[in-house]
């Protein structure tokens, strides 16, 4: 693997899950692999889990880790070519990226969708420039359209908890006060379909995701109907993908909040969310605190997904 930006980079998913299981059971088995190698983590956006789990994963592999928050302490970066830089941005990304690349062996990048320019977001404007100009392997730590490290951890978690070969997995839209990107639901839909699960995506009308990511998923608009018999409920908010309302919030219907009444429709489903989560918007206190909530082991598996990916890349250096 050279870069890790989507499910297509992981190779055969079954084999990747076996590698992940080895990593989880033997977290320090490859401590020599990363000796004298440096992982640079670049954050254009905030993070708790990705920051800590990716650092921990690299450290488990014996790597040195440098973390840079671009918006706190670094020069403000211009990302558009051809701009007369007479504003508040002191450095162009076209110099900054190769400089960053010269300080490390692998770069992790977090850069969210701006949600104003759909074509810029869906061309992965920032991530693709890191791939083009850094000269180093690039790991997506959530980009504009996908969050593959999260989705890989989600699939690892489902594999650990599933009680049948092909569980019914329902990803449901849920309300949120602010516009959020489609990256997490895009990747979860794509990875869970690739894992061969019986996947349903349920959302209010107008919230359909890109068909590129929901291929192989059933699409529903009635949450109660979708939840019937579910083995896993994955709650997530996302903003509109459709051109006319791209990046907007067009529904805040609290009837979509995942509650005990909703979970009662399922096959005693496990509750999942990538976190951070807005309690009593996305999910009620009772559901997230219930024995069926697996959000903490799900987050813990972020170390496993990151370590599996970084290990694969280190082996190619
Ligand atoms: N799930 C996730 O990526 O969490 P953070 O935004 O805290 O990194």
Image: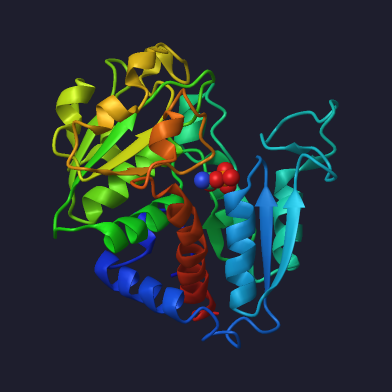
> In this picture, is 224 found above or below 19?
above
Q: Nearer the viewer, residue 58 or 140?
A: 58
> In this picture, is 167 found above or below 283?
below
- Could you tell me if residue 131 is visible in this image? yes
Q: Quadrant of residue 158?
A: bottom left
Residue in view at x 54 percent, y 77 percent? 314
Q: Position of residue 184 (x, y in %)?
A: 43, 40
> In this picture, is 243 found above or below 100?
above
Q: Left of 231 or right of it: where is 158?
A: right
Q: How many marks?
A: 0
Q: Quadrant of residue 52?
A: bottom right
Q: Left of 247 or right of it: where is 266?
A: left
- Could you tell me if residue 5 is visible in this image? no
Q: Left of 182 or right of it: where is 259?
A: left
Residue in view at x 36 percent, y 39 percent? 186
Q: Nearer the viewer, residue 84 or 280?
A: 280
Q: Quadrant of the C terminus?
A: bottom right
> Which image quadrant shows ligand 1?
top right
Q: Position of residue 229 (x, y in %)?
A: 14, 38
Q: Quadrant of the N terminus?
A: bottom left
Q: How is the image coloured?
A: rainbow
Q: Left of 214 or right of it: where is 21?
A: right
Q: Position of residue 109 (x, y in %)?
A: 60, 52
Q: Position of residue 44 (x, y in %)?
A: 67, 42
> In this picture, is 233 found above or below 135?
above
């Amino acid at each position: 693997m050279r870069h890790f930006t989507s499910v297509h980079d992981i190779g055969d998913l079954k084999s990747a899950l076996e590698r992940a299981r080895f990593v989880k059971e033997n977290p320090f088995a490859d401590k020599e692999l990363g000796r004298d190698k440096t992982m640079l983590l670049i954050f254009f956006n905030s993070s708790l889990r990705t920051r800590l789990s990716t650092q921990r994963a690299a450290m488990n592999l014996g790597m040195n880790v440098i973390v840079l928050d671009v918006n706190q302490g670094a020069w403000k970066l211009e990302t558009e070519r051809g701009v007369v830089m007479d504003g508040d941005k002191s450095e162009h990304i076209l110099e900054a990226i190769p400089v960053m690349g010269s300080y490390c062996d692998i770069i992790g990048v977090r850069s969210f969708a701006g949600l104003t320019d759909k074509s810029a977001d869906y061309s992965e404007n920032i991530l693709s420039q890191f791939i083009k100009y850094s000269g180093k392997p690039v790991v997506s730590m959530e980009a504009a359209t996908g969050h593959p490290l999260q989705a890989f951890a989600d699939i690892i978690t489902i594999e650990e908890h599933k009680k049948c070969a092909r569980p019914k997995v329902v990803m449901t839209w849920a309300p949120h006060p602010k516009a959020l990107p489609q990256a997490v639901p895009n990747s979860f839909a794509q990875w869970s379909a690739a894992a061969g699960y019986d996947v349903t995506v349920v959302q209010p009308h107008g919230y359909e995701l890109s068909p590129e990511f929901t291929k192989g998923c059933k699409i529903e608009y009635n949450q109660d109907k979708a939840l019937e018999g579910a083995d896993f409920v994955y709650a997530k908010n996302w903003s509109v993908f459709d051109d006319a309302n791209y990046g907007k919030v067009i529904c805040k219907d609290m009837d979509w909040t995942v509650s005990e009444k909703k979970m009662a429709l399922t096959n005693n489903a496990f509750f999942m969310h990538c976190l951070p989560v807005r309690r009593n918007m996305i999910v009620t206190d009772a559901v997230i605190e219930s024995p069926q909530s697996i959000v903490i082991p799900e987050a813990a598996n972020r170390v496993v997904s990151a370590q599996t990916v970084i290990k694969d890349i280190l082996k190619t250096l």
